[in-house]
Amino acid sequence: MLSPQLDATFAALADPTRRAILSRLAQGEATVTELAEPFDMSLPAISKHLKVLERAHLIARSRDAQWRPCRLEAAPLKDAADWITKYQQFWEESFDRLDDYLQELQASPEGAALTPSKEKKNVPKKRVGKHHE
Amino acid sequence: MSLKNESVSTTSDREIIIERVFNAPQELVFKAWTSPENLGKWWGPTGFTTTTHEMEFKPGGVWRFMMHGPDGTDFPNIVRYKEIEPPHRITYAQGNDVDPEMFEATITFTPQEGNKTHLQLKTVFHSAEVCEEVKTKYGAVEGGHQTLARLAEYLEQQ
């Protein structure tokens, strides 16, 4: 159901620290030290998370020897977002169609029989055969 | 009863919930799920059609169908009904010939004032091959989706 890249993306996103790192990187490039700042975590611990994100191709690290700033890789994240969106879209559109179908059913004698009519008492007789558009 | 509650709490980390209020009574909304004729009228996104090969709407029964995409692609599907409680609840497993139980869905129909019906579709994902891993992966869906929403701006710049 999921491609290997989607698997890797979702697995990498499963951790709250890694999600926070990605959110930070959405604002722009940052070094390991900058990324570690908001967390009560050692640099090696942060580095470990960065390696997971790098292996999942969610971030890339520049080759500039000393600073090696990290930046976000957008494509795999977009694929993950697309997958969730597609699944939700399947149901949103199905439910739109179901909504239409239910209105249709209620207009039919069979469906009307299932609809408890509260305004039964004073229904004025309508001219049969004339349908307003 | 307590079992049901339990299963809700143990799967909450890998489920997607979609809700909708329909302007129709509970019995009618439920009915829309009970026959190929009814399902064929609305199942699938815009432009999709559904051909039913077999359907037995009862616990243990199967709905085997083909979804035809707008571009001509066919998607075989198998739904196996687990629990049916008219007009309140339907639980089924869905998949295809390769993996007949990709996920489990529970549809709950709740009557609302004014002859309306609240429908909740809860999908719980599971995978036979890597059950433990999947738990981690789908645990990511909720939090991941929030992250993804926040990243939307960034993605648009790409």
Image: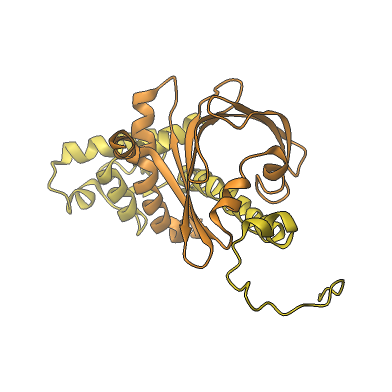
Chain colours: A yellow, B orange
Judging depth in this view, the residue of A132 and A12 nearest the camera is A132
Res B26 quadrant in image: bottom right
Point 59% across, 26% down: residue: B61
- Residue A22 on image: x %, y %: 33, 49
Q: Is residue A108 above or below residue B80?
A: below
- Count of residue discs: 0
Residue at screen point 40% across, 38% down: A10
Tell me what residue is drawn at x 54 percent, y 24 percent: B60
Q: Position of residue A16 (x, y in %)?
A: 27, 45
Instruction: Answer with the quarter of the image where residue A41 lies.
Output: top left
Q: Nearer the viewer, residue B136 or A66?
A: B136
Residue A53 versus residue A123 in the image, above or below: above
**Vertical placement of B63 versus B21: above or below?**
above
Location of residue B75 by image quarter: top right
Q: Does residue B87 appear anywhere in the picture?
A: yes
Who is closer to the viewer here, B120 or A112? A112
Quarter placement of the N terminus of chain B: top left
Furthest toward the front, the residue is A121
Indicate left or right for B65 with B6 as reference: right
Residue depicted at x 23% and y 46%: A32
Q: Position of residue B59 (x, y in %)?
A: 53, 28
Is residue A54 visible in the rendered structure shown here? no
Q: Position of residue A28 (x, y in %)?
A: 35, 57
